[in-house]
Image (cartoon, coloured by chain):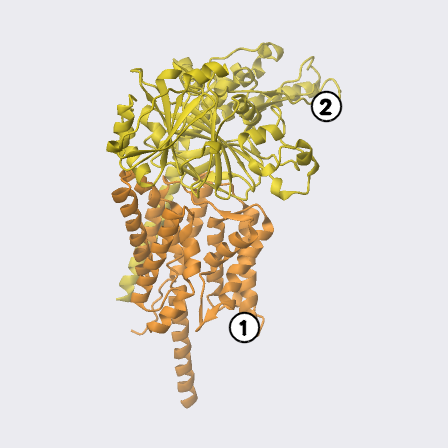
Amino acid sequence: MAVAVKQWDARYFQMAFQVIFLSYSILFLQWKAEWLQYSLYIGTALILQWLCDAILEKKMFSPFQWSSGGWKSALISSLSLCLLLKTNNWSICILASALSVFSKYIFRINGKHVFNPSAFGIVATVLFTGNAWLSPGQWGSSAVIFFAVCCLGFIVVTRVQKLDITLAFLLTFAGLLFIRQVIYLNWPIDFFLQSISTGSLLLFSFFMISDPRTAPNHAVARIIWAMLIAAVAFYFSAFKWMNSTPIFILVLMAPLVPLFDLLMKAKIFQWRAAVKESQQATINFIKSKRIYHG
Amino acid sequence: MKRKIISAALLLVFISSDVFAFCGFYVSKADGTLKNKTSQVILVRDGERTVITMSNDFKGDVKDFAMVVPVPTVLKKSDIKVVEADLFQRLNDYSKPRLVEYFDQNPCERRDYELAEIVTQKMSAPSTANAKEKSEDSRYKVKVEAEYTVGEYDIVILSAEESTGLYKWLTANKYKIPKGAEEVLEPYIKSNMKFFVVKVNIEEQEELGFEQLRPLQIKFNSPKFMLPIRLGMANADGDQDMIVYAFTKNGRIESTNYRSVLMPTGKNIPLFVQKNFGSFYANLFQHQWEKENQSVSFVEYAWDVSPSNFMKCDPCVSEPPNFNDLKEAGVWWLGKDVYEEYVNEYNTNKTKNVFFTRLHVRYNRKAFAQDLVFQETPNKENFQARYIITHPATGNLTCSEGQNYLKELKERRKKEMSMLSQLTGKGYDDWDLVMDPELNRTTVDTSYQSIAVTESTPMKKTGTGKTVFLASMALLSVLTMVSIGRRGKNKE
């Protein structure tokens, strides 16, 4: 039967997990709940996304008839900002959100945006305002089991959607850390376990680098790219003593993606909902023809 | 029995400060095993430059002891200096958790509202130690990079190729290496760390006439912004406390590999804590530390102490650190030793900003697998661990407002009691109280004792919320998976 199968968009799960992470952190990890900041992040992102979509479609539409998946992307980016970016200044929240959304429209090559929106927003805000920061230790390492379970849950429900990037990154990064810390420096194993059991690392690998829209299209290219990010991030954290290197390196390496796409051709990734929409459009088109002919 | 709990916890914080420790380890030539328990460290950091001052309250025969601290570079003589011990006392007094008192007005006597803020204090502080020996041997693959005498200390800076060599060198020089130290030496050697080995130069010490050993201050340039606590765990059993006083230009420091937790603050607690504040805070710290799963660093104080900021504390427990204290602590960016210049640059010169952070870490081998690594953040939000007690109104309370007041007082005191057990995990009966005659000043049924009897004794609140949360999340994910599975089947 040619009934369109209702497959949930993976982005719904992503949102759900981000909300769970945030509430867990506030409820049990003594995070100070910055409600004003959260609403500014989310509000700014949604409003700007809506405006951008309206301008591109050259018509004002009510937010309830928002057909494109733009709001999902904006919501996910702003939830990432809520989870990762710290500041004491409300205007920074607006700036970070705006940078995230605009980066999708300003930096585009071949119909793909170059930077992961939230990573770009975070890195640009931290580097250029000097008034925002990341707290890599904010989850500690005792919450890691909770995070791991959620991430595994995410894999299950999304049916391994582009998990290759996550695994390539995580295995390379952890592998290099293991070689350096345990084999070379001879630290006990719990030293290494603490390095990899931070919520920030899991969040990055499952919810940021894994974004299929900003990764190379070709499967092999994706894996090389993820491993490259892991290796460079490892270098700067182990030898240059920098913090939160994966996010910075992700942004730094983003311009390589169009290069990979040029060298290794493959289809551009589309979220399931978007695929469905285009299929539906085709079906409608055919139907209308039929009616016309009939 | 219950009294014992309190006194035991007290021991942890107070007795512990008798025995000094730093993140390095003490090596002893004598047989008596030394324990590191509490240490105080001043960290000054900007860019890649770090100044570390290690307090030294070592008690014992100075000629028998030495301290080993891993450092990232070979220090020059000008990078090492001895500072006055009371600096630590001043910083501690300024930043320690504080108790604020308020006074209720008697509603039956219309007087102007009287408010008084008296600040009580807590916790003692700092002071040092070591011996002298000299030997080098290439057989041990240990290189003596430099040797200096600074103040009462003889200092040797070593680099080593292998931990067994360093171990043997120290042994050959008649140091007794604590058990467990050898395994952590290797990672430091391979990370290209040098070893700063300190002993006391007895002649110098006698000549200088200082009874107590003074804190040592070192400075170096390195991207590494950390404190090597792992080495310090070598000769300490159980938990050790460390208080870090940090001075930075832009804002708070925080640990990048351990979670930072703000101490509960601004809580109303029972009046009887006034005379027991030390033990109250010791219990509070222990309870919060266990509640947070140990692997955390607590923020006890954070304040902008820049010359341009007039309000350097609120309320002030003691004098805020002045120009000389900051200079002594190693804050180099304040400029020349000209106090006028410092004062005249009020409001304008951002390069003279100084932000102060006090962190309190209680660590042990199990919960702390890694050294403490820090980062400076632009977070300038002030913070203090501050607790509030309120004195009841006195005098005749027979008027109707007075009666209402007593009812409210009783309710308030119930809340204070439950706050007390929430903060410290202890109930009224657990307190070995230094009784204040306050109980006689209020009517019997508003006394804490009577409230404690009516209220049930301490509630055990341990992570039930967390379990419920986790369980509901698990349920949610199972449901999601089931629904996904069904959809999959429908598809077929």
> Horizontal and vertical percent for residue B255?
44, 39
> Horizontal and vertical percent for residue A112?
43, 69
Under circle 1, the secondary element is helix
Above or below residue A143? Residue B244 is above
* Camera-nearest label, 1 or 2: 1
Quarter where residue B132 is shown: top left
Q: What residue is disc 1 on?
A: A56
Question: Can residue B30 be spotted in the picture?
Answer: yes
**What chain is the orange one?**
A
Indicate left or right for B158 with B423 as reference. left
Residue at 37% over, 59% down = A210
Above or below residue B445? Residue A207 is below
Q: Which colour denotes chain B?
A: yellow
Residue at 29% over, 15% down = B31
Q: What residue is disc 2 on?
A: B113
Quarter where residue A181 is shown: top left
Subunit ID for the residue under disc 2: B
Under circle 2, the secondary element is loop
> Horizontal and vertical percent for residue B288?
44, 29
Q: Quadrant of the C terminus of chain A?
A: bottom left
